[in-house]
């Protein structure tokens, strides 16, 4: 009999007044019994609407049915058929706007906890099964993948399954891209990322770090090294700023730098590491997306007494996941909504002192469909802060574009590609993920990597014929 409860089985979590002082994972995961109970809420719809909402086409009802039957390893293998990084996706994918949004159970009550169940089977596998990964025999053809983020890892893994010698060139000293430097430890433990990347290496994927393509090698030089096709998945790591007075003061960070120092360089373990981050007592984070929530919650854990989210629209327009907003509020983050920064003021020795803001009103919708914020006359006020973190978006790094002749890009820097294949304006060169779309989600980047891997396979097979 299906479980007809209108609510998901609650996920155990750390208490908010405990977790906001540590970097351990917030959500603690399901037990076996909880997972079975939640899986029994699935109605096993024949038309599978949830699958249509999954960018990598996970066969959701099938793996959930296996969970309900207690066949956890079989459920994991079913997910792995199309998703190379299930433990990661189960934690950070916005299921509420993808697979779970289309769940029939969501029409009357809450959807099935698809993401929670995906995380459960991945964690169960890691804890109970020692992988014996077989490497597919090489077909002798070399493909270069630029960037070891979600798009690049997925593309390289799928190519390795098809027999290609896939080499990833990663600019940082650690593979993983945004999974390692952008998403905090309390949302995505780095050991999980390392474990799933290790599985790709066992499949034959070669990962070379500290390799800045466009500086160390250009794509034309890699062609001379024997690479026959290329995938650009270098992400969107170039931070945007507001261009307001005071952004050059000491104590102003881009969210990219702030989170990289904390996550990848482990600043939260200082003084055991040599990567300090000055936070101070009061922090303002400008922006309302997931990155802003991550920065604010990280600042709180780094010892800040007051942390503000400063966002120019209302709560209804916040682009962050509802779960992240909910967790931020529980942890004591202060939301200054309908508020826009005007300038940042500093001390005589050049450090941040306060941020001048103004209140906003919502007018007519703009090009994004959201109501445009309009300045409210005479509403200026100051927020006393020691640190300001700018989290208003990121763009692709222009390095590859500037060193690759004939690569067509949009005005904002994203690479132009053919829909559903990732094919660029250069023969044999494909691209996907944030470098094409701008900052988006992990699972969408993975979907783009998968599509490009299939297109590269088709291209190289045709080339051989």
Image: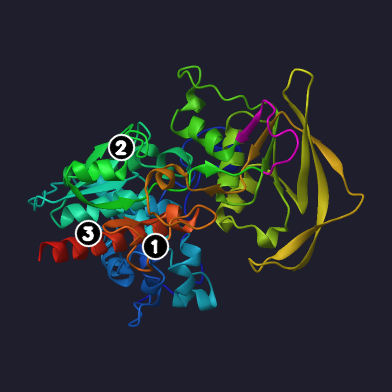
Q: Of all residues shown, which one is farthest toward the right?
A: 378
| Viewer-nearest residue: 402 or 209 | 402
| Distance between mark 2 and mark 3 Cα atoms | 38 Å
Color encoding of the figure: rainbow
Name the residue: 74% across, 33% down: 246
Which x, y percent locates residue 221?
Answer: 26, 41
Q: Main secondary structure of the magenta part?
A: loop
Secondary element at tag 2: loop
| Viewer-nearest residue: 341 or 323 | 341
Which x, y percent locates residue 434?
Answer: 45, 53
The magenta segment:
242-253
Q: Which residue is mark 3?
A: 77
Q: Residues within 10 Å of mark 2 (few under 14, many from 20)?
A: few
In the image, residue 455 above or below residue 308: below
Q: Determine if the magenta segment contains residue 252.
A: yes
Q: Quadrant of the C terminus?
A: bottom left
> Is residue 198 in view from this perspective?
no
Q: Of all residues shown, which one is farthest toward the front?
A: 405
Mark toward the viewer: 3 or 1:
1
The label shown at residue 417 is 1
């Amino acid at each position: 009999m299906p479980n007809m409860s209108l609510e998901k089985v609650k996920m155990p979590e750390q208490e908010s007044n405990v977790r906001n002082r540590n970097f351990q994972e917030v959500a603690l995961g399901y037990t076996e019994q909880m997972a079975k109970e939640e899986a029994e809420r699935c109605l096993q719809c024949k038309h599978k609407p949830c699958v249509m909402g999954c960018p990598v086409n996970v066969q959701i009802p099938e793996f959930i049915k296996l969970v309900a039957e207690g066949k956890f390893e079989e459920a994991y293998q079913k997910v792995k058929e199309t998703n190379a990084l299930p433990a990661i996706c189960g934690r950070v994918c916005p299921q509420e706007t993808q697979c779970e949004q289309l769940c029939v159970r969501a029409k009357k009550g809450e959807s099935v906890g698809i993401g929670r169940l995906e995380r459960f089977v991945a964690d169960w596998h890691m804890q109970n099964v020692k992988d014996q990964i077989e490497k597919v025999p090489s077909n002798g053809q070399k493909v270069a993948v630029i960037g070891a983020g979600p798009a690049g890892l997925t593309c390289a893994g799928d190519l390795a399954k098809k027999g290609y010698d896939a080499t990833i060139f990663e600019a940082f000293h650690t593979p993983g891209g945004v999974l390692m430097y952008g998403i905090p430890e309390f949302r995505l433990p780095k050991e999980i990322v390392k474990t799933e990347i290790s599985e790709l290496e066992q499949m034959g994927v070669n990962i070379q770090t500290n390799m800045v393509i466009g500086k160390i090698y250009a794509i034309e030089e890699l062609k001379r090294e024997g690479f026959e096709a290329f995938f650009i998945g270098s992400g969107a790591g170039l931070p945007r700023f507001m261009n307001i007075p005071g952004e050059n003061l000491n104590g102003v960070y881009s969210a990219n730098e702030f989170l990289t120092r904390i996550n990848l360089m482990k600043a939260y373990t200082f003084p055991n590491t040599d990567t300090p981050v000055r936070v101070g007592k009061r922090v303002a984070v400008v922006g309302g997306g997931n990155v802003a929530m991550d920065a604010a919650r990280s600042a709180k854990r780094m010892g800040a007494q007051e942390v503000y989210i400063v966002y120019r629209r209302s709560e209804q327009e916040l682009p962050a996941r509802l779960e992240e907003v909910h967790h931020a509020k529980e942890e004591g983050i202060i939301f200054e909504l309908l508020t826009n920064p005007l300038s940042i003021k500093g001390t005589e020795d050049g450090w941040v002192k306060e941020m001048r803001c103004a209140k906003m009103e919502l007018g007519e919708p703009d090009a994004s469909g959201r109501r445009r914020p309009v300045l409210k006359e005479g509403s200026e006020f100051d927020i006393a802060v020691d640190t300001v973190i700018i989290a208003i978006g990121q763009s692709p790094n222009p390095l590859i574009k500037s060193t690759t002749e004939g690569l067509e890009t949009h005005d904002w820097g994203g690479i132009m590609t053919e829909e559903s294949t990732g094919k660029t304006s250069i023969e044999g060169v494909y691209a996907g993920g944030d470098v094409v779309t701008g900052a988006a989600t992990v699972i969408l980047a993975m979907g783009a990597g998968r599509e490009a891997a299939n297109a590269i396979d088709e291209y190289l097979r045709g080339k051989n014929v």
